[in-house]
Structure formats: structure tokens, C-alpha cells
Amino acid sequence: MTPFELVFILVLAVGGASGLVFIGVLIQWSLRKARPSRPHQIEAADEVEPLPPPELALEPTSELIEPPAAVEPEPEPEQYVAPPPPVREPVRIGLGLRKTRENFLARIRAALTGSAKIDEIYEGLEEALIAADVGVDASMKIAAAVRAKMGNDNRPDAIRAALKAEIATIMMSADRAPADSGDSPLVIMLVGVNGVGKTTTVAKLAARLKAERGSVIVAAADTFRAAAIEQLEVWCDRAGADIIKQSQGSDPAAVAFDAVKAAVARKTSTVLIDTAGRLQTEVNLMEELKKIARVVARELPGAPHETWLVLDANTGQNALSQASIFGDAVPLTGVVLAKLDSTAKGGVVVAVADRLKIPVRFVGLGEALEDLREFDAREFVDALFASDDAGEQSASGSYAA
């Protein structure tokens, strides 16, 4: 092979290879033009705005679709509150006077209808009054006044009406308004012998005066009797009253002084001073009452504003002796007659009014706190003379039975 032929073959080989390379490049370029590369596709996709979602055609409906209700939290269960105890109606004084009234009216009827003679009629009246514990002096005085008024008129109804009016006059003559302490605490001291119900009377008064006047402080000045302070504490808890106390054997005047001082500082409405029970013949204990009154007066001028004697209605005429001796020690301004519901000697109320000229403030008709009733002289007389039928008819009143 000549050199010329060899060069020619090499030229052909190089040309063929170049053609093949050109054809491959052309094919790749054609394919790239027909299908864009991935980066260009992503960039184009970013530039295209998204199409809105297709709207769905809503079918017409006649029902109103309400939004779902808000879920409310479950209410907490209410705490159980016990209902208040039923209010107990207080005992009527007519019920307390039933024994006295039955005995008294029976004797009055016997005196008025047993004889037509004037002397015998009025002797029977005196006996009826004495049997009811009105007292000998008061009974004779009342019978004489009725006889002077009626003369020779022996009509039973007229004499009975005159007797009722005379007793009412005696009762009303002893009546007086209670003390007024102004803006200061009202200080009431209670005195009496042993066993008349003084401590329970103090508690009943505390409950009543708290409802009527406001806060009450009780001075436990009975430092002599064993367990007296503890007993009074129990009653004060029931009545809702505060108590000022010291240890047993302390000076009662000091206890009363502390109670009055505390009442002034706290602006308390009422102070009740419970004193130790004592016999009217015990001179040293009676002097102790005088000391209590003096000490209290130094702390609060004018105190004690009231001094009430607690009497047991069952004692009858002995109550007059007690009242006389206690009145010599301290000036008495009223009487609280306890246990009237358990006696037929309720006429002692008339004797107290006639001889001592001091009013009966309250009467006890039971053991509950509500069984202390304010005394009214006119209603007491009406209840005392109420016949059986009239008494039952007027039982709705405060003093009839």
C-alpha cells in the first residue's frame, strides 16, 4: 500500500468518526428541545398561579342548620343545707294559769251562788283569794273594796265583774316602764334564793333580749355554787350569748365589772348578771349583792339599770318575804315569776303587786328558751277570770287559754 492510500484511509476514518460524533450531538440536542429539563419544569411550576377549587353546587334545603351548641361545664352539686327547725309557738300564759284559774273560779262561783247573804258572799270571796295565794291582807283589802262599790247588790255577775276590775287596778298600779340606758349597755342584775330557776331564767332572757335588742353578754357571777359556771355556759351556747367568767371561788363583783367593761368596749346592747342563789337570811351574801351593784355603778354610772328578783311561783306567800329582804339589800325594779305553769298559787302575782308595788316583768311557763313570756297585767287578769268556754275560744291570744 502506498503512502497516499494510507493517508486517504486515515482521512476517511477521521471523517467518519467526526460524522458520528456530530450525529450524536445532533440527536441529544433534538431530544433536549423536545423535553425540557427538570429545573426549568420546577421554575415554570412556581410561576403558574394555582387554580381555585371547583365550586360544588349546593342543593336547596328547607331545614335550618344550626351551629353545634357550646358545651357547658357541668354545674357543681349544691351543698345540702338543712332546713331551719320549725318555729315553736310559745306557751300561752292561760295554760300556765290553768291550775290557778280552775281553783280560783270554782271558789268564786261557790261564794257567789252558795248564799244570797252579803256577809257570806264576801267571806267566800276572801277565802277564794287567800286560797289562790293572793295573801290575807290583799284579800281582805280587795273584798272590802268590792263590797264598798257594790253595796247591797248581790248579783253574781256584777260582783264578779267588780272583783276583776279591782284586781286589775292593783296590777296596773304597780306597772311601770322599763329602764332606758340610752346609748350605753342595759345592765340587768338577777337575784334570788337557791333553786328558783335563776340560771335558766338568765338564759331565756338572753335569748329573748338578743332577738329584741341585739348582742348580749352574760356575767357568770355565781362563783359559789359548784358547776354553776359550766351550766350557764351550756345555756349561753343555746341562746347564742357571750359569757364572761372566772374560776370558781372568784370575786363575783370582779366578774360583773369585767362584763360591763367588755360590754362598753364592744358596744353590746345588754348585760345580764347572774348572781349566786342565797337565802334572804344570809346577811354576808346579801352584802355581796350590794358590792356587785356598787362596783358595776363605778364602771357604768346608773348601772345596774334593772334589778329583777326571780321567784318560784310554787313558794306562794314565802315569795313576799324573799322580796322584802332582797329589796332591803338592793332596789328591786321587777319580778320574774318562774314555774308558773306548775302551780295553783298564781295569785301571788297580785300579792307582789299590792305589797311591793313592783311590776312582774316576765313569767316562766316551761323549760324551753321560748317559754319565758313578757307579762301584761290586763291580759293576766283576763286569763285569770276566763271561764272554761271563753278560755278555749280565746286561746289564740297571747294570754288566754
Image (cartoon, rainbow, N blue to C red):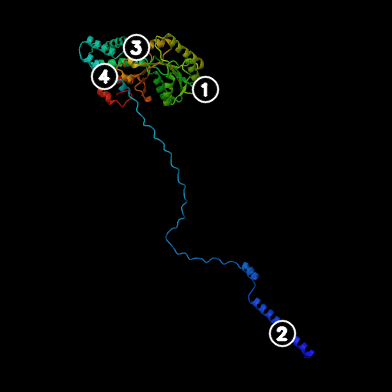
Q: Position of residue 32 (x, y in %)?
A: 65, 76
Q: Which mark is residue 198?
A: none
Which numbered disc flags the more N-terminal residue, 3 or 2? 2
Query: Circles 3 and 2: CB distance less than 8 Å?
Result: no
Spot the residue most to the right.
3
Image position of 144 with respect to 72: above or below: above
Query: Pointer 3 and pointer 4: residues touching (CB < 8 Å)?
Result: no
**Separation of disc 3 and disc 2 at Cα?**
163 Å
Closer to the eye: label 4 or 2: 2
Return the residue at label 1: 265
**Residue position marked by numbered label 2 in the rendering:** 16
Name the kind of residue labelled 1 in the image.
Ala
Q: Which residue is mark 3?
A: 318
Asked if residue 169 can be seen in this view, the reply is no
Given this view, does label 3 or label 1 mark the residue nearer the observer? 3
Label 4: few (<14), some (14–19) or many (≥20) C-alpha neighbours in 10 Å? some
Upstream in sequence: badge 4 or badge 1 = 4
Tell me how far mark 3 sits from mark 4, CA to CA.
22 Å
**What is the total number of numbered labels drawn onto the structure image?**
4
Q: Position of residue 140 (x, y in %)?
A: 29, 9
Disc 4: which residue: 102
Q: CA distance from mark 4 to mark 2?
A: 159 Å
Quadrant of the image occupied by residue 109:
top left
Say which residue appears at 29% left-offset and 19% top-offset.
384
Residue 350 lies, in percent from the top left, at 33, 15
Decide if residue 313 is on the left or right side of residue 121.
Answer: right
Secondary element type, mark 4:
helix
